[in-house]
């Protein structure tokens, strides 16, 4: 080889080496970003939530093929571990799809494992802490709520059968099932997230799944203040109201933050009191040590053995509770709850679904009637007026924020009407250029009557809250 040739070869080799190093560096960089990409989808234009690769047809085809082939091999094995699955995927891809780069391989491996042992396409959304709710409307439409905003995702299921398989994976271990004779089901994920599924023909657009994610750390009153959900004065007043044993009803629409507020209020209960909580699906997380948690139970497959919230409220009265906290009243249990509040279980708290404090009273009345006791309306109203001290109204505003829009006290009866007065209020002025709500909290300048009850329990009231 002449000198010139030797130099050219050397240069080529050097160049090739440099190229190789550059590719390796790029891949390394991409892998570094990989875990970030995997746990957090990005929000793209038009309010879409994007998981990388989720709608790339070619990529998804290789992934499905790998899943199929690996499952075939796994079916013949007795013992399967994550490591076996990983190495099978690796072998298959190296042999059949050498064009796949390392990053893609990692993504496929993760997704195929999610498919085999997890909840498939939902897994990425479940692992993203910034996602608070997941809504599957049939196979091809998945929405999430993120920072209070509804976003469409690029994630899909293959078909209806795929959705059904995924929901089966959630409910079967809990001894429940979803099928033609049982087309609606409630369940919880291992991390406590609440799941509801309803299938055709009831849901016309295909099996619909709603997952309310359980935030790893429950929101505190400080968080709510930071989010602008209530003012300092309102927070201090509510703390005094809970410590002073007022009976409180949190009212609001779906997803307005009722359960979250109930949890925050319950945190104010002094730790020397015995608390019994009653829920359909245990969502509350109290920090106190002395808490008894009760959960209702649906009927079994033969239709027997249901234990309702109402059964549990009645049972709770025999458990020497200082406070009874009911996750939500929806029916006849409301009567038992009112009776408990009226007969020495002051300081009980619950939530109800209503759009204003006045509306909430009407709802309560209807729910008491559902107890089937045939009570005259005037008697029901007496019970309500005597039992409930405060109604805290919460709302989800258009910008996704949650606000306590009103705190009212129930003052008694005038003729046949329950009387109320508003103590705090949110004044909505409009929306700013980013479509965020602009407004403020103010007190109506009334010193509530319930202050007497609060001070009688030895809790201080600060008049500055009201004036
Ligand atoms: N003050 C708040 N600010 C911001 N987000 C909130 C606030 N309160 C609750 N959230 C979020 O809103 C979502 C719904 O909250 P929550 O479960 O408390 O509502 P809910 O009224 O009990 O709903 P449902 O009617 O379905 O029972 C959750 O993701 C929660 O983290
Ligand atoms: Mg709730």
Image (cartoon, rainbow, N blue to C red):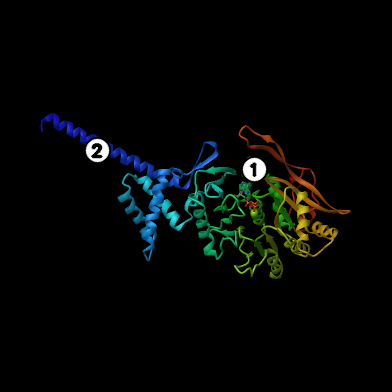
Q: In the image, what residue occupies the spot 73% across and 58% down? A: 245
| In this rendering, position of residue 83 left or right of residue 133 | left
SS assignment at label 2: helix
**Residue 31, position as x, y percentages in the image:** 38, 45
The vertical placement of 42 against 352, above or below, is: above
| In this rendering, position of residue 368 left or right of residue 258 | right
| In this rendering, position of residue 368 left or right of residue 17 | right
**Residue 60, position as x, y percentages in the image:** 42, 47
Residue sitting at the far top: 4
* Mark earlier in primary sequence (1, 2): 2
The vertical placement of 50 against 386, above or below, is: above
Displayed quadrant of residue 78: bottom left
Residue nearer the viewer, 187 or 348: 187
Whether residue 293 can be seen here: no
Q: Mark 1 highlights which residue? A: 228
Of the numbered discs in the image, which one, if any, rests on residue 92?
Answer: none
């Amino acid at each position: 080889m002449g000198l010139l040739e030797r130099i050219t070869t050397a240069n080529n080799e050097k160049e090739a080496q440099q190229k190789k190093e550059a590719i390796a560096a790029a891949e390394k960089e991409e892998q570094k970003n990989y875990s970030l990409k995997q746990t957090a989808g990005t929000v793209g234009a038009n309010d879409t939530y994007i998981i990388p690769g989720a709608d790339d047809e070619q990529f998804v085809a290789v992934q499905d093929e790998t899943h199929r082939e690996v499952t075939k091999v796994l079916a013949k094995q007795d013992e399967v571990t994550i490591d076996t699955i990983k190495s099978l995927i690796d072998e298959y891809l190296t042999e059949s799809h050498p064009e796949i780069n390392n990053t893609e391989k990692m993504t496929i491996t993760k997704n195929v494992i999610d498919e085999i042992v997890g909840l498939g396409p939902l897994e990425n959304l479940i692992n993203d802490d910034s996602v608070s709710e997941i809504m599957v409307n049939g196979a091809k439409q998945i929405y999430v709520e993120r920072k209070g905003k509804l976003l469409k995702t690029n994630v899909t299921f293959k078909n209806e059968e795929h959705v059904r398989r995924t929901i089966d994976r959630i409910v079967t271990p809990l001894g429940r099932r979803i099928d033609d004779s049982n087309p609606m089901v409630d369940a919880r994920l291992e991390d406590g997230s609440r799941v509801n599924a309803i299938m055709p023909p009831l849901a016309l657009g295909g099996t619909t799944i709603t997952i309310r994610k359980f935030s790893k750390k429950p929101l505190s009153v400080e968080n709510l203040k930071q989010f602008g959900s209530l003012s300092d004065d309102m927070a201090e007043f509510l703390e005094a109201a809970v410590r002073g044993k007022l009976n409180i009803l949190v009212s609001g629409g779906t997803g307005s933050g009722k359960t979250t507020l109930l949890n925050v209020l319950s945190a104010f209960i002094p730790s020397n009191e015995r608390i019994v909580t009653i829920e359909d699906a245990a969502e509350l997380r109290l920090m106190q040590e002395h808490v008894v948690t009760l959960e209702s139970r649906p009927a079994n497959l033969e239709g027997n053995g249901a234990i309702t919230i109402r059964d549990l409220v009645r049972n709770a009265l025999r458990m020497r509770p200082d406070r009874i906290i009911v996750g939500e009243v929806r029916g006849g249990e409301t009567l038992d709850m009112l009776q408990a509040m009226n007969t020495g279980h002051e300081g009980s708290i619950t939530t109800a679904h209503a759009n204003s404090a006045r509306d909430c009273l009407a709802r309560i009345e209807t729910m008491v009637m559902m107890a089937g006791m045939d009570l005259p309306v005037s008697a029901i109203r007496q019970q309500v007026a005597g039992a409930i001290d405060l109604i805290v109204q919460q709302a989800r505003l258009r910008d996704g924020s949650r606000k306590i829009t009103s705190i009212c006290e129930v003052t008694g009866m005038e003729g046949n009407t329950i009387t109320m007065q508003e103590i705090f209020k949110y004044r909505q002025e409009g929306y700013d250029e980013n479509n965020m709500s602009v407004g403020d909290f103010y007190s109506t300048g009334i010193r509530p009557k319930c202050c007497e009850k609060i001070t009688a329990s030895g809790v201080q009231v600060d008049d500055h809250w009201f004036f």
